[in-house]
Amino acid sequence: MRKVKEFRDFSIQRSCKKKYASHSSYKVFLREDFHQRCAYCNLKDDQITTYFEVDHFIPSEVCKKYNRIDLLTDYSNLIYSCKKCNIAKSNKYYGPKTKNNLENDLFYDPVISPYENIFFRNEIGGIDSCDVKGRQMIVDLKLYRLSHNLVWLSEEMEKICSLLNKKIASESDKCKCMLLYEAYALMLNESQKIKSFMIANYNSL
């Protein structure tokens, strides 16, 4: 399928310099650095009712097995993730298996390798990639789920609603204003239906 839209329009920069005993303590910093979005699927955390989680890029079980307990609370190994992506990624790991050299080659690190260069949105809103590893990540992380298409569609419709609202506010012609308002009301109604369906679909998987 062809590329229709960029996967995301921002880069992720880590800013937290603090040290905590628990990985969950970093969540507030991760949320800020990852722009309130899942690093893997780009879902915004206020679009769903399920709480986001803290994922270990090098899985916690691998860290424990190879005596790298430090990585459990190392900010550079922590990822802001929605629950579904975290569950799908789980303890999947492929790479070196020595204490001093752990690298998860199954996945691109979303901070080191910007996902906007690997993934894109196709004509039906699905997450797609022309990259071999990227396409395998879509399978491993289940980025092919319908909920990801619905998220994209919901966001696009909300953007159109916002544009229509601005047009209404600046339009002086009453007839044009009425037509714009009718279009806005229709789009808003459909957007809310799509979002409700998306949330139900996400929570059911």
Image: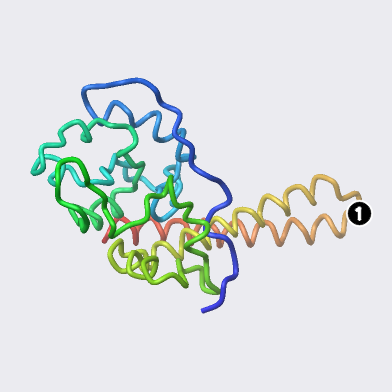
Q: Residue at x 51, y 79 (%)?
A: 1
Residue lying furthest bottom: 1
Q: Residue at x 25, y 58 (%)?
A: 88
Q: Is residue 98 above or below residue 180?
A: above
Front-most of residues 158 and 133: 133
Q: Is residue 96 left or right of residue 195?
A: left
Residue lying furthest left: 65
Q: Quadrant of the C terminus?
A: bottom left
Name the residue that disc number 1 marks. 173
Residue lying furthest right: 173
Instruction: Give x and y (percent) for residue 92.
Output: 20, 57
Total labels drawn: 1
Instruction: Give x and y (percent) for residue 40.
Output: 38, 53
Front-most of residues 173 and 199: 199
Instruction: Give x and y (percent) for residue 140.
Output: 28, 64
Q: Amino acid at mark 1?
A: Asp
